Image (tube, coloured by chain):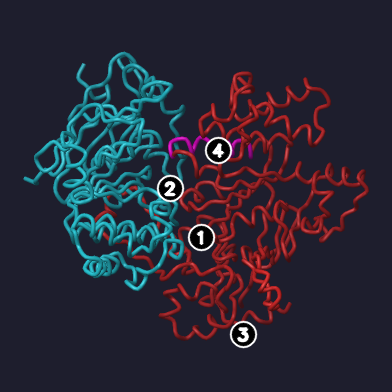
Chain colours: A red, B cyan
Amino acid sequence: MVNIYVPKPDNETVLYVKDLRTWFPIRRSFIDVIKRKPPLYVHAVDGVSFDIKEGETFGLAGESGCGKTTTGKTILRLVDPVGGVIAYRPRERLLKEWEEMGYHPKFVDEYKSIDVSKIPDKYLKPLRKEMQMIFQDPYGSLNPRFTIYKILEEPLIIHKIGETKEERYELIARVLEQVKLTPPEEFLNRYPHMLSGGQRQRVGIARALLLQPRFIVADEPTSMLDVSIRAEILELMMELKERYKLTYVFITHDLALARYICDRIAIMYLGRIVEMGNTRRVLENPLHPYTKALISAIPEPDPRYRKILRELPIKGEVPSPINIPPGCRFRPRCVTYDKTTEIQNYCETEEPPLIEVEKDHYVSCWLYGTPEEVKDLIKK
Amino acid sequence: MAETLLEVKNLKTYFYTTKGVVKAVDGVSFKLNKGEVLGIAGESGCGKSTTAYSLIRLVPPPGKIVDGQLIFEGRDILKLSEEDFRKQIRWKKISMVFQGAMNALNPVYTIGDQIAEVLMLHKHMSKEEAMKEVYKLLEMVGIDPKRAKSYPHELSGGMKQRVVIAMALALRPPLVIADEPTTALDVVVQAQIMNLLKKLQREHQMSIILITHDLSLIAEMAEKVAIMYAGKIVEYGTAEQIFLNPQHPYTRGLLASIPRLTGDIHKLEFIPGVPPDLSNPPPGCRFAPRCKFKFEPCDKEEPPVMEIEPGHYVSCWLHAKK
């Protein structure tokens, strides 16, 4: 009996995403419009489903262009999806605030989740207090003309937290202490360029924490930092997670790093999840041909590797996300496909769903179930 | 006994900025044998790229090589005039694979023309001869020779990097410096490029100086490893010595901060603090302010370079004789 993945919320689920699609239209020339050429899209996120439990660190991993960042941004509605459900279970505080604004969101399940993709723009602001983002580039994500104080005061003013200047100062000083930029007075009047990369990323984290969110999307928060200080930032993030019961979506291209901090992980390729499950299970026993190839390519600090050439079970290059290959989108690069004649037929015609291969380990590959087996399941 | 190809003695490259003299490379010495791969590792701002640029005398202003010797094939190439250096050494003898291949190529020339230019200028080949050689070079780096007519924007990042490698190898130099040859590339492409470099290095018996912040990449290729910190080499040895028996606290800290794909998950370590300002380096050992083993002599006097086992050098007071 084959099982396929469908997000099933329970009372621990904070967020789940079902068949999420985010496409970016490509600008057409005037001539193309006149000739009525159909509009083209970049299929950045193209049918992604997963669920995240409270207090979990969920990893989204993959190469550049696989849609991991777009997925993160879509969850926060920094980008609008074209389809799918983003179900988030808000805290009472947020529901109350919406009520005061005169907005009564529809619940999409019995756990009082709301569909983030359906919230009208004007009611998004209170949601920001629940869901925040830590950006990748600590050099580009802080306004160079603002002092640290001003950078951190801005969200407080926007969200009308802290009535007086003194109150806001108090909040800012406290958050700086939380991210260990101490003593706070020493940092408040500095400009971003006067801080090191690690310190800047701490300001980025402080800014995300300031509104007391419970859900944070961290987009490669350490990839721009030197190796020797990465662990320091990660440790801080994990500490804050414990203390404030945060839930993280951790976007990364570094699978080795993901192994240390993510509870569960989803490996993405060309806008879809190809493998998902418990991080150690996925990374120590990868089942999808793409995950296998990715893992075989990761260098390790072991001088034995110098004597061998790495075997990379993958061919070609990532195709354009505008014209996604039919069937399994990894097929053109799949070495297993070439070798496994009996399933080629499926690979060419049908997109594989996430098939449960072992407990909490899903793989989107026809090696692990035939279309006949899963078809009835999809219909259900 | 292996033949020495390059010996760097006490190299100093300073940047004369308006805010003072930044001692980016401050007394770097190492030896490189023929056919050997040396990895230079260190974090941003440690002077590894400046060392690389010093070797082909392309330090961008306001930087200047102020002292030292670069003995290449028996003569000091720092003493050559700029004209002679350009004609005799740069690219013919020492070439470079630049960081960020994306920007190293000229967007308005086809890649074939760009590689051919090297051959026409240095070897005085005709365009036809040069193009024949270009096809061979492209094939060597795994690109379909038909792509010679492509412009850089038509190629993927990995292919551009291959073109840059082909360009560096065009004159078959005995020494190639690869400065972060795979940054900004995805892991799969990175592994392909590393495989290519390894293969070419073996086939052509080249020496390579591989410069990167990623110790894992160094382990993929280098026989000798130099760890740089704040403008100095703090530890130098064979790959086995550095990776299996690291002695300098900085090297140890770096290795312990790398997440691994296999084995037990222990806590990742970090090195507190930030590297020093190189226009005003701390007295004594430059790593002392961040070092957890710091003791009495560390912030007073610079530690000497000690050979603690054959070929394994460490600059740390923990290993110096009292």
* Amino acid at the residue labelled 3: Glu
* Amino acid at the residue labelled 1: Val
Q: Residues within 10 Å of mark 4 (few under 14, many from 20)?
A: some
| Residue A236 counted in the magenta span | yes
Q: Nearer the viewer's eye, disc 2 or disc 3? A: 3
Residue lying at 65% horizontally and 33% vertically, measured from the top left: A206
Does B296 sit above or below residue A192? above
Does A374 sit above or below residue A197? below
- Which quadrant holds the N terminus of chain B? top left
Chain letter for the residue marked with disc 3 in the picture: A
Residue toward you, B99 or B290: B99
Residue toward you, A338 or B149: B149
From the top left corner, tell me how far across and down residue B130 is, in percent: 24, 65
Horizontal relation, residue A86 to residue B270: left or right: right
Q: Which residue is mark 3?
A: A372
Q: Nearer the viewer's eye, disc 3 or disc 4? A: 4
Question: What span is colored magenta in the figure?
Answer: A227-241
Chain letter for the residue marked with disc 1 in the picture: A
